[in-house]
Image: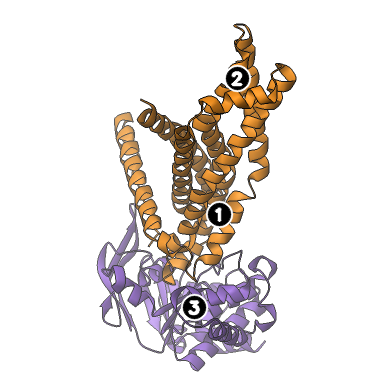
Amino acid sequence: MIRFEHVTKHFGPRKVLDDIDFRIEKGETFVVVGLSGAGKSVTLRHMIRLLTPDSGRILVGGDCISEASGADLDRILSRFGVLFQSAALLQWLTVLDNVCLPLRQKTRLPEEKILALAREKLALVGLSHAEDLLPANISGGMRKRAGLARAIVTSPEIVLYDEPTSGLDPLGSRQIDRLIDDLRRRLSVTSVVVTHDLYSALGIGTRVALLYEGRFVACAPPEEFIRSTHPAARGFLRAQGIETMEDVRKAFQE
Amino acid sequence: MITREPEFWDAPANPFAAFGRAIVQTCRGTGRGLMLLFGALLRTPFAFSRRNRRDVLEQLYVAGFKSLAVVSVVALFTGMILALQVGLELRRYGQETNIGMLVCIAMLREMGPFMTGLVVAASVGSAIAAQMGTMTVSEEIAALDIMGISPVRYLVMPRLVALAVMMPLLTVYTDILGILGGAVVGATQLGISTTAYFDNAFRYAVNKDLYVGLFKAFLFGLIMVTVSCHQGFAATEGAVGVGRATRRSVIVSFLLILIIGYFVTRLFYQ
């Protein structure tokens, strides 16, 4: 579905991505973890052409997004839904209008159909009661859920989540995690999640990849990832107090 | 896409390199600003389409009515100051009856569009730059780009249409209030009857004075929106960057209003 071919990226003299090469299969939830500044969001931004690689290329279902432009780029981007770290809701629109926005601006659907679709997605993320509120008047977790409803309202094939649980309390984080997992099951979307929350990563990921010094030093299903012997992975697991998958399950049950 | 990759520059080796880089960056900024303007102009036929109608009407309201109070005060006092200064000088030569003509022509040709431009650039233009800057640093512009919603059509074009329409209308309003302010000063400070003032004012003013002033106002509207949106979209580094973009948008708009105003005057009155 998504393939990175020997992608390298520099920010000034600093090498952020160092010849990374991986593929994400259709229907999986691929989670990128790493320390702050490791290049997780940079990886995500390459997938939607907010950044272009210095070398290498990125393919989305056979189309090279890193070299596409114009209508081709629009067509590839239409396959994505993105939940930004800040949710990126337009502040002067209500939650409902934010979710309606892509349909109003990009389709010729009648208004009743647009409202019905938006309300359906808001119900899916549990925000039916907040449709008339402005983003400034709702909590951080609700904002993320509204952003998620907007990201999926056009029924994308791939949903990208940039730090979906950052700034949320543990309960709010687990709620978002369950939502991501639930959406993957119900909508059969391919998900790419960037986070530094290993509980989230191991709880929802079908594969977890650790980005360290611009390279993936560990990339495996959660059960294997937790047994990784790489010092960076061990340190990361230890820092978050995770020893077995049982710790992760407990966190999700709480 | 409006969203741009962050740029990294090495520190310039010497003052000449720094000067050269400043020139290159100014040229790039000008090019991007012009591309933004042409992009928005190309989309103006969609101004009253189903998608954009609401935004355009809202921006017409914001640009026109919300700056009305401050424009009124500035216009009235511009006319009054002009009448007082000119009137006191003319009185020395017994020519104070001519203040009507001088105030009217000055307002129509220069002071009307110029003062309106400054007020609107400082109020509406700075607000546009701050809004675009905040949207840029909080990734709202990137979100629009990814959703396939053109920020030029959704955000820039409605503001361009609003200021292109409202600037000439506000200028007419400024002209009227300025001339009335002059009449008040003429009657109360210089002893010139309002009949004599208006008779003198409209005897010498010609239609061209009004049209050139309105043309200037229209150009100033385009300049303000282009500069404000361009500076906003270029904002980086959070709140500091938004503040910097807002300040730059006001400064660049003021300078361009002065410079373009001069060249338009030269073009029509040489």
Tell me if B83 is positioned left or right of A200 in this view: right
Which shade is chain B? Answer: orange
Above or below B174: residue B105: above
The mark that comes first in sequence, 1 or 2, is 2
**In this view, which residue lies farthest toward the top?**
B92
For the residue labelled by badge 3, is the local secondary structure a helix, a strand or a loop?
helix
Which residue corresponds to mark 3? A103
Q: At label 1, which amino acid type do we have?
A: Gln
Q: Please name whichever residue, B126 or A225, is drawn nearer the observer in this view of the structure.
A: B126
**Residue at the image position 42 percent from the left and 75 percent from the top:** A210
Subunit of mark 3?
Answer: A
Label 3, label 1: how far apart the Cα atoms are: 23 Å
Instruction: State the mark number for residue A191.
Output: none
Q: Are marks 1 and 2 in contact (CB under 8 Å)?
A: no
Q: Please name whichever residue, A147 or A254, is drawn nearer the observer in this view of the structure.
A: A147
Q: At label 3, which amino acid type do we have?
A: Leu
**Residue at the image position 48 percent from the left and 45 percent from the top:** B221
Q: Are marks 3 and 1 in contact (CB under 8 Å)?
A: no
Looking at the rendered image, the quarter that the N terminus of chain A falls into is bottom left
Location of residue B21 in the rendering, given as x and y in whole percent from the top left corner: 32, 38
Instruction: Choose mark 1 or mark 2, whichever is in front.
Output: 2
Location of residue B194 in the rendering, given as x and y in whole percent from the top left corner: 69, 25
Which shade is chain A? Answer: purple
**Residue at the image position 44 percent from the left and 62 percent from the top:** B153
Q: Please name whichever residue, A193 or A142, is drawn nearer the observer in this view of the structure.
A: A142
Instruction: State the mark number for residue B131.
Output: 1
Subunit of mark 2?
Answer: B
